[in-house]
Image: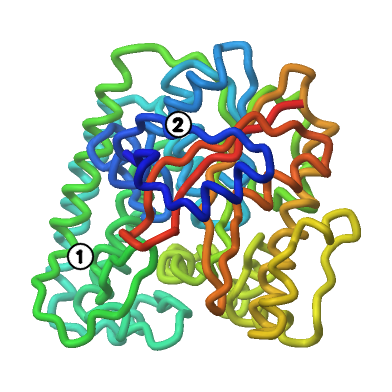
Amino acid sequence: MLQMELFERPYTDIHKQNGIKLSFPPVNDPTFAGGLNESVHRWFRLTPSYSPELVRFLFGWLECDNSTVVLDPFLGKGTTLIECKKLGYPGIGIEINPLLFEVSKRSTEWEFDLDMLKNTAVQFMKLVEGKIARNRNLTCEQYCERNKVKMPIIHNPFRWWKNHALKNLLILRTLLMTKVPDELRSPFWIALCSSVIDCANVHRNHPTISFDDNHNRRIDVVEDFKNKLAIVISDLEELAQRKYEATVTTFLGDSVGELRNIVKNSIDRVITSPPYPNRFSYIHTTRPQLYFMELLDDIGSATEIDLRAVGGTWGRATSVLMNKEIQPHKDIVDVLDFRKELLCRSVLMCNYATHYFNSMFAHMKMLRPLVSDAFRGAYVVGNSRLSHVDIHTELYLAKIFEKAGFRVEEIMFFRRRGGKKRLYESAVCVRV
């Protein structure tokens, strides 16, 4: 928990000068780690995500109930919608990353014939073990050639996975798509998707991943998958003990340009965590699963999605930002007071930050006519430092919300990020 006395004076003074109320609520663990031991949330690990405890706190603070429609326009792994479904609140989620969209959608599918699911799991594992035994002496390339199986189209797949691990993962994928009925597929899909990264040659950093070359870890794909599937089925058995009547719906799309076309309901609440302006790419770090699970059909698709994403900063998205100076939207030019200093230090970084806040302003303007008269929202964000220039994300977003027709209630600070000075995670709380 972040105490006020740990909050550095210069930052405090900046917010006071702008007349914004600050608070430091008691949320024990707002990070992804807070959900690792909770049902459903533990199915898929996304280190930049927030915790179910934080979502529940915001539900209470925003006075949500089973009549309030909750929107998460930057859905990620689906934490907000999972909690909506558990607590009985109608929810809508939008996610631009096809992998995270699939994870969110499948993580909120809980209605299964459990006897059939468990029987299918037993039979599936027998098929897997038999096929692995029959192909034990083949390399991954030989297995793919003989069985007409496509390798992941990611660059240098054998840097991502050991040969035997990739072969066994591909056997699991083939049997999943051919032997598991469509209506039972989601628990298997979730388990395999998680095994794809946990059985890869990577370090699970926060928030990124990096290669773990020449490691000596023992990788048992079948055991890893089997354990993950057992956890999913165990949670589904627990969830079956009660009825979940709330309707939650996920959409694959862009919450900037496509928001008005996707959202047909009047929105009462928003609880979300958009990307931070810290040059982290959700698309880039999910490439192994995007390509392995065959959610993208050509190697250039990932960078094209990043180009459309808020804060996109990988591949062609960076090339575009380098072309010429990006101007702030005329309505927020007075808000972005970092630009003069940052432009002198790095045109690329200035363009990146300007594009980020322009995109968030476009999102806010798109959202404003869709909300009810009782609307309240919380946007969880982190500040950053680009080329040694402080980017006060929460303060800039608060001012931009006001430009878009919202009122700022307060800014809540939850934690110091990564032990670094003056890097925090906060929520910009707004209403109409």
Quadrant of res 96: bottom right
Tag 2 secondary structure:
helix
Numbered badge on residue 131: 1
Q: Quadrant of the C terminus?
A: top right
Q: CA distance from mark 2 to mark 1?
A: 43 Å
**Side (left or right) of 215 relative to 145:** left
Against 88, residue 10 (above or below) is below
Q: Is residue 304 left or right of residue 239?
A: right
| Foreground disc of the pair 2, 1 | 2
Identify residue type, mark 2: Val
Mark found first going from the N terminus, 2 or 1: 2
Residue 431 image offset from top left, x and y in percent: 71, 27
Q: Which residue is mark 2?
A: 55
Residue 80 in the image: x percent, y percent?
A: 49, 34
Please rate how many residues cluster around mark 1, counting C-alpha atoms within 10 Å: few if below 14, some from 14 to 19, many from 20. Answer: some
Give residue 250's quadrant in the image: top right
Residue 282 lies left or right of residue 414; in this view the side is right
Residue drawn at the location 56% of the way across and 12% of the way down: 66
Q: Nearer the viewer, residue 101 or 150?
A: 101
Residue sitting at 47 percent across and 51 percent down? 9
Note whether residue 270 is visible.
no
Residue occupying the far right of the picture: 330
Amino acid type of the residue tagged 1 in the rendering: Lys
Callout 2 crowding tier (Cα within 10 Å): few <14, some 14–19, many ≥20: many
Give the number of the disc on residue 276.
none
